[in-house]
Amino acid sequence: MELYVFGADRSLLGVIEAYEHLQWTRRYSACGGFTLRAIADENNLSLLRMGHILWKNDDVEAGIIDHIELNAQEQEYITVGGRFATGLLARRIIWQTEMLQGNLSNAIAQLLANHVIAPSAPDRAISGMGFISSPLSQTVTMQVSYRNLLTTVEDLCAACDVGLRTAFDPVTRVFTVTLYEGRSTSAVFSREFENLTEQAYTHSVRDYACVALVGGEGEGELRTFVTSGSGSGLGRYEVFVDAKSLRSEDFGEGYAAALIQHGDVRLKELGMAQSFDATLHEHGNLRYREDFDLGDIVTVVANRWGVSMQTRITEIEETYGADGRHIDIVLGRGALTLAQKLKGV
């Protein structure tokens, strides 16, 4: 693996020849990120600058430096971090109201075209950005205004269980936002199979909901309400979802369906937390990027804990250091972050 650095204009500047630590975190339905720590020699100081692009030649994604720290101990060190190029979408908001109806790929293509690739205001365009997606069956019916573009796209992908990444072509210098779906594999992760060295299991219903009462337009008894999800007895966990911003005049006969989907998206976010964090045995029977990769559906087994689950790999963290490469994986859905909780308030 070689680590190349490109300028903000995406021209090749050089190679990072030596570093102490690189953490490269890939996420399925969200933007990934990286942290690099190296000795602050002349080469590294000249290459590791704000806005410069890091690209590993064994990956399609690239990271953009948005944070720099310099410190002196026995030696001087530089630590840089940032998000992958998908994070460029966070620099834009949805400038006006967008009506999204139909295929998920078309909906995201519409958002990117109107706010990044070919917006009506030329100053809002980000040059060298494209979009491509394989055919997807998931559909969207929603209205969105003034939200952060990256957050909106991530939420749509998470609700539809679709992968999101931005590929960098060092020859054409183009960033291409891509939607994809992980494979269904026969890979089985288990300490009993000696392909894991560490593991941690989480199962929680603290933030769980399976039935949503969705409130649309109107006031009091005249307000429109629909229900999404299902459940009964002790297995029924309810939540209220405010969708007053959705107007019937925008959706016509599809208004109830739009409200239901609004509730379904929130219920997806409030799904039962069941995740398995593990460190991969580098010399085990499963090969990274061949037998499994980010987004793939795999099986994880911990017989002593009575745990067996078939789930998606939602995050992979690659760590490079003096003792070689380590791979940590997250399978399934973890607990809500504070930002995710506040979004439903």
Image (cartoon, rainbow, N blue to C red):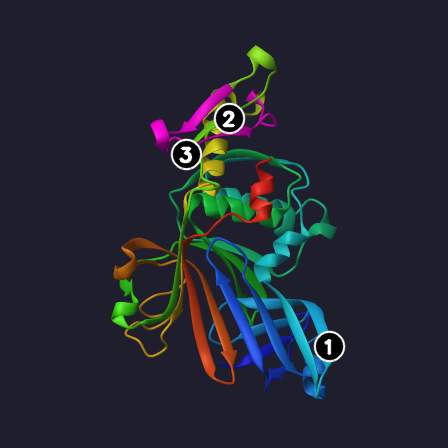
Q: Upstream in the sequence, badge 3 or badge 1?
A: 1
Residue 24: give x, y in percent of width and height.
52, 70
Q: Residue at x 57, y 58 (%)?
A: 86
Disc nearest the viewer among 3 and 2: 3
Residue type, numbered disc 1: Leu
Query: Marks 3/1: CA distance?
Result: 48 Å
Between 102 and 241, the one lying in front of the other is: 241
Query: Marks 2/1: CA distance?
Result: 50 Å
Q: Residue at x 48, y 49 (%)?
A: 335
Query: Marks 3/2: CA distance?
Result: 13 Å
Asked whether residue 185 is in view, the answer is no
Q: Which residue is mark 3?
A: 210
Q: Which residue is mark 1?
A: 70
Q: SS for tag 3?
A: loop
Q: Residue at x 49, y 28 (%)?
A: 258
Q: Which residue is mark 2?
A: 214
Q: Are marks 3 and 1 in contact (CB under 8 Å)?
A: no
Q: Upstream in the sequence, badge 2 or badge 1?
A: 1
